Image (tube, rainbow, N blue to C red):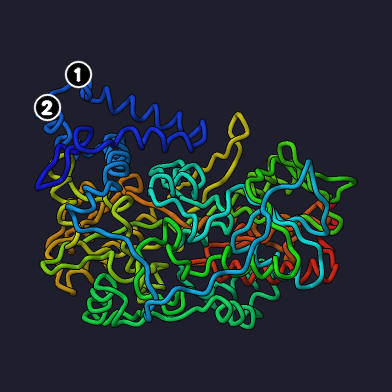
Amino acid sequence: MAPGVGGLPVAERDVDVSGPVAKFLGSVSPRVLLRLRLGLRAFEWLPFPHRFSRMSPEGRERFLQKLGKARSPIKHDLLLMAKLFSTLGYAVTPQVKGAIGFEISCALADGSLPEPAGSLGDTTPVGEGEECDVVIVGSGAGGAVAAAELAEAGLDVLVLEAGQHHNRDSYPSDHLEAIAELYRDGGLTIAEGKPPIPVPVAKVVGGTTVINSGTCFRAPDPVLEDWKQRFGIDWAHDLDADFAEAEEFLHVTQLDPERMGRNGQLAMEGAAAIGASGAPIFRNAGSCVQCSSCPFGCRIDAKRGMHVSYLPRAVAAGARIRAGVEVSRILTEDGRAIGVEAPSYTVRARRAVIVAGGALGTPELLQRSGLGGGHVGRNLHIHPACWIGARYEEEVRGWDGVMQSFYVDQWEHERILLEATFTPLAFGGAWLLGAGRSHQEAMLDFGHIASIGVHLSDQSAGQVGLGSRGSLRASYALTKDDARRLTFGIARAAEIHFAAGASEVYPNIVRAGVLKPGDLPGFEATTFKPSELRLEAFHPMGTARIAADPRQGACAPDGSVHGTRDLYVADASLFPTSVGVNPMMTVIAFAKQVSRGVASGSTSASALASA
């Protein structure tokens, strides 16, 4: 997979790849590990009657090249899996990064460091259990904001997080260790379907805000109006003050076009050349002008994730944070939530239980507890996305500047949002063309690659359930219509790349190959099956959606779970439909609404009626 080309080291001879990857795989769940073992075994025997590991180097090279041209989605999935793990272990080594010139760094405009965040106190669970007024399961954008609101209202709040606490003083420097430590299942959570779609989410104090891009959008007005009219969320148009307060507290700032980096500038220039509307992105990172470590935790914590913003604010008001607590079920008594239980640790809550484990973790916990009814886990939306790379004659060095920097909303009517996004080599390297020597040549050319993310506000849906041993199982059915819209978005990203001067574009569809200027009409005239697309997703939502009518959703408009008193949800699970933009700010606004109701002591009439 990595024979050594143009000064790159030879895998296993010059650098150890398999050892660190094997250690990394110890962080994934048994279900995920079983899938990977089956996949690797299939890859090993794919050249039957030969075994891949016993072929000559020349034979392996020929086989990889043949596999790269195969039309079978299964064969291409197996090749992509092999590239992913070989690249993941290979691209993080100093020798590879040095040969390519790739480096990761973060900086503010004036070169200073952000002020240290307030303390989170002792995050170790106390004894066999604790008591509080409100226990919150999850510490991401929903849980952290709810904790701050409730603690500042005078309630005794306890926040439980399955992951550990990290900040700029303790993020693992080794990227494989960082992925294993900061992500659920090492980032390998998969929404099963055709195609299977990775949905990486965090498992760390601060939740996914620790490893996201920091992009801050308000929910679009048409979406909020739809939620109000169809699902009875009367307060959906009353969020401006909540958005404004959060933007000020999180230092949300629009990027300076002169300092966003060449990857964003090329997207901006290409969009302007074809008359497409867009703008530099707003981020919760103040004057940050260099940012390429976001997926591994911001090296200087310029990005104000929950662990350096709302959680310290909550602790300053009296809240307690407990890390490394994997809640297994919600405790109830006479139809009322009274606490939660984890192995060897129980929390009793006098006032309320708030679940904020994200749109994967929240339904998992509710289902394990037998609460919420049949709507829990349904209506999963994920914003399917794909990265469309392009080669430029000029040097782009996409790792210089800000990782996610410019958006194009020209095709919002088609539910498409484009975002100039450049991912680190450990993640982005696997999507480069070729296999073996040709893939290594593409890696050496990484400095000339720019990328645009195509992001769909999906009408397709999936569901979250429990496997045979109680483990998370997510599935997702991408419709032909949404596949068509994604293909349209790929064409628009390619159009922008070509307008900015790209010599070729990589649409990440095997049958489409490489696009050259002039190839777009033929590409757009082709119909691609959903299974042919190679996608990722980063915004799971909707699996405990709000609806005034219990027949439409799992939660009432105040966030209370239908059928159980004093049990609430405060995360993206509440969204009735796809929000269409990066969801962090909408999660914050929803959490504020839910927590204010809990603080006031009001209980949803619909929750009481359906109990």
Quadrant where the N terminus is found in the figure: top left
Residue at 58% from the left image edge and 50% from the top image edge: 164
Q: Is residue 427 visible?
A: yes
Q: How many marks?
A: 2
**Marks 2 and 1, the one that precedes in the sequence:** 1
Please indicate, yes or no, whether residue 581 appears anywhere in the rendered image.
Answer: no
Name the residue located 42 percent from the left edge and 62 percent from the top edge: 299
Q: Is residue 288 left or right of residue 238?
A: left
Task: Please identify the quarter of the rendering in which residue 300 is found.
Answer: bottom left
In depth, the one of 423 and 71 nearer the eye is 423
Q: Residue at x 32, y 76 (%)?
A: 260
Callout 2: few (<14), some (14-19), or many (20+) C-alpha neighbours within 10 Å? few
Q: Amino acid at mark 1?
A: His
Residue labelled with disc 1: 50
Q: Is residue 528 above or below residue 216?
A: above
Q: Is residue 366 left or right of residue 273?
A: right
Asked whether 174 or 567 is in front, the reply is 174
Residue 362 rendering spot, x and y as whole percentages: 64, 50
Marker disc for residue 380: none
Query: Looking at the rendered structure, which numbered label has been put on residue 59?
Result: 2
Q: Position of residue 558 (x, y in %)?
A: 74, 66
On screen, residue 315 above or below 27:
below
Determine contact: label 2, label 1, CB under 8 Å. Answer: yes
CA neighbours of label 1 inside 10 A, class few (<14), some (14 to 19), many (20+): few
- Percent coordinates x, y for residue 508 in the rendering: 26, 52
Three-letter code, disc 2: Gly
